[in-house]
Amino acid sequence: MTKKDLSVYVHIPFCARKCEYCDFVSGVASREEQAYYIRVLLKEIRVFAALGNLFPVRTIFLGGGTPSLLEPTNLSRIMRQLRDQYEIAEDAEITIECNPGTLTEDKLDAYREMGINRLSLGLQSADDEELKLLGRIHTWQNFLDSYEMARRKGFQNINVDLMSGLPTQTLDSWKNTLERVAALDPEHISAYSLTIEEGTPFYEEYAVGPGRNLLPTEKVEREMYHYTGSFLAEKGYHRYEISNYAKEERECRHNIVYWTGGDYVGFGVNASSYLNGRRFTNPKDQKDYWESARTAYANFRKMPPQSEQATMEEFMFLGLRMMQGISVREFEERFHLPYQQVYGEPTQRMVRQGLLEQDGDRVRLTERGIDVSNQVLVEFLL
């Protein structure tokens, strides 16, 4: 039996302070609450032990929340459990999300010992006033100290998360953030546009409240996006996904698994998985998660695979986020249907509108299509 590659996501839902814009399952927790969560998390990982016979692990992503808040001993327990259960590739990409101000030299030494070889630093902005508005706990100098410390400790694969479209942000302040970060020469930059989610303080203030006029206009947001691509290209970064830029061979292998329909399992509260054609998500409520953890694998085994229609839709609207687009040949080999029969009409229509381009086997978004990508991708819902 040929083994298939597996990616592992571990959700650490703890933060020093909840950011004003964040709608992820995360928040402040006591040491006792953290310790209990880790015990339940390890139990959930153990009940999936049977996967170790089927899947070699190629990527691991410790996300949150702020995983770098955890004491290294707790992270080490998680990594040890994963290594006990899985065949982890020698060249596996193992990432931890870190917030500036939560890193120490001892933590970075411990990460190296655990085999963690990629850091994702949540900067968001190089402007201290913008950081304060977001509710971040760090300053630009805190980030700079963390980044330089990570380099001294030998980390050679670092991503920096940035966010545009912030209240009061201007094109010039965004340019300044990009220039200051690019000057540090990280291997990867993720540049997302702020999405204001209902139920967050930002929604009350900036979506329906008095701060609506403080958001950049749609025109300015598009200028920010286009400047990002051209500026980072000049600095040696290629855009390989709508919001992600990397130096040569430094793309995030873990996220590419999500966009290309690979198998992954998520551990922790509200973590999502896609495994053997089954898509499932852990409970969002921590108490419900605690109760379900011991039976999680049995529940997964009982689930029916998702429909072929849902899988085809995901193939298209996830794959088209990649700059290389989707492969017509791969679609036909996977679904045993002519691409033209299923998606020929919307593809040809959007090619005529200049939103897609077809180059031999590949179908991809144009620059104009990227600008209205959400409108384009919805066309592939059957």
Image (cartoon, rainbow, N blue to C red):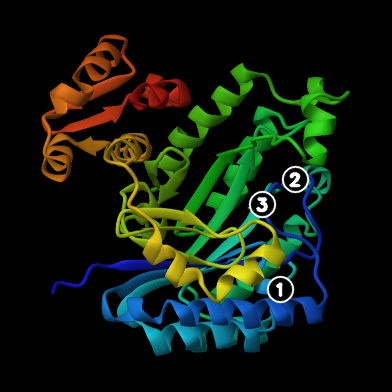
Q: Name the residue under label 3.
A: 24
Q: Does dot 1 land on a helix, a strand or a loop?
A: helix
Q: What residue type is labelled 1?
A: Leu
Q: Tell me the CA gap for discs 1 and 3.
A: 16 Å
Q: Residue furthest right?
A: 210
* Mark 2 / mark 1, whichever is N-terminal: 1
Label 3: few (<14), some (14–19) or many (≥20) C-alpha neighbours in 10 Å: some
Q: Mark 1 points at which residue?
A: 69
* Mark 2 / mark 3, whichever is N-terminal: 3
Q: Where is residue 234 in the image (x, y as percent from the top left)?
A: 41, 40
Q: Tell me if 257 is positioned left or right of 190 in this view.
A: left
Q: Which residue lies furthest to the front in this view?
A: 302
Q: Which residue is drawn at 33% across and 80% down?
A: 52
Q: Mark 2 points at which residue?
A: 127
Q: What residue type is labelled 2?
A: Asp
Quarter residue 168 falls in: top right
Instruction: Give the mark toward the camera: 2 or 1.
Output: 1
Q: Tell me if 109 is positioned left or right of 345 in this view.
A: right
Give whichever of 307, 240 is nearer the camera. 307
